[in-house]
Image (tube, rainbow, N blue to C red):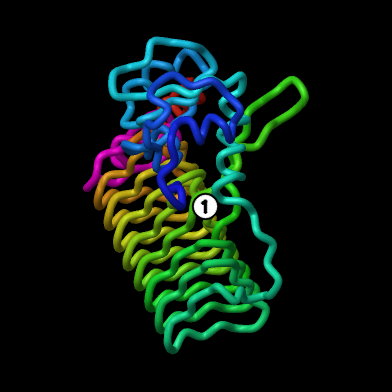
Amino acid sequence: MDFNRTYTLKEVSQILQCQFIGDENFLIKGINEIHVVREGDIVFVDHPKYYDKAMHSAASVVLINKIVDCPEGKALLISEDPFRDFNKLTIHFNPFIASKNSISDTAIIGENTIIQPNVFIGNNVKIGANCVIHPNVSIYDNSVIGNNVTIHANTVLGADAFYYKKRPTGFDKLLSGGRVVIEDHVDLGASCTIDKGVTGDTTIKEGTKIDNQVHVGHDTVIGRKCLIASQTGIAGCVIIEDEVTIWGQVGMNSGITIGKGAIILGQTGVTKSVAGGKTYFGTPIAESREKLKEMAAIKLFLKDKKNL
């Protein structure tokens, strides 16, 4: 998530009321999670297991809960609770602004786009030309929709990420400050839910077609010309490359990659990354021919055992 201008390390430390290590004039451009962090960003880390990863990431500033040696060319913000303070930065730089109208005055809607009754369009939404947005669709703030997009009834774009930290008192939510970006010629079926990124974008690229009742988690990137059938659940931070076909009731773990041109057959549990150009089936996932041979062998074994 980019700031509206460049801030210094000292300015950000004053927002958080925390100690810093590094040049007070060190420049900061935004905040991001570890998997999308860039030079100029702040990343947070609150567990020793991930200290090294954060320190050696592209981030320029690490928001951390321990004083450690600062790598050359970086700076540190020392916080008692980096998770809490990361939320403070999201609230400060991207606060929630309540809508006053069903279609915000700040929304930009392209030529020949049809908006059906009872559609909600939030602040700073951009919708291209020749789109059709069907009834009861909700498009949250800052979403970006390209040209020639169709979105069917009851679909929600931009709900919060499902991202929580367990505390003794319950679960604390990591606030979402990212966006949903839908490129040209995408179709979204009825009652789909596309969560926004925590700090970056959840993206569906050009020409992809999604059936009814599909869930796409935060920060997931779906490639070009993919086909995704109904009741598929895609967790956060998944990368689905171009021309992938996913059939119904598929479930995916977070943080995995589906290679270009892969086919995932119905009711598969995608528990790990898989290469492109192959067909997969089952839970745990395997190449479909191997999985079907395995199932046939088990069936034959049970039949022979019964006949003993």
Q: Which type of secondary structure does the marked residue at label 1 adopt?
A: loop
Residue 269 visible, this orientation: no
Q: Is residue 271 above or below residue 29?
A: above
Outermost residue to the left = 277
When the figure is inspected, residue 81 is found, relative to residue 295, above or below; the finding is: above
- 8 vs 133: above or below: above
Q: Which stretch did the figure color magenta?
A: 274-299
- Is residue 115 positioned above or below 107 on the image? below
The residue under the point 57% across, 62% down is 141
Q: Residues within 10 Å of mark 1 (few under 14, many from 20)?
A: many
How many numbered marks have been drawn onto this rendered protein structure? 1
Q: Position of residue 30 (x, y in %)?
A: 43, 42
Q: Position of residue 58 (x, y in %)?
A: 31, 31
Q: Is residue 287 left or right of residue 96?
A: left
Could you say which quadrant of the image residue 61 lies in? Answer: top left
Q: Nearer the viewer, residue 220 or 36?
A: 36
Q: Is residue 253 left or right of residue 122?
A: left
Q: Amino acid at mark 1?
A: Lys
Q: Position of residue 127 (x, y in %)?
A: 46, 74
Question: Magenta span has 119?
Answer: no
Residue at image coords 42%, 27%:
24
- Looking at the image, can residue 100 be seen? yes
Q: Residue at x 61, y 51 (%)?
A: 95
Q: Which residue is mark 1?
A: 196
Q: Residue furthest right?
A: 169
Residue depicted at 58% across the width and 62% down the height: 140
Q: Is residue 288 magenta?
A: yes
Q: Quadrant of residue 34?
A: top left
Residue 103 falls left or right of residue 143: right
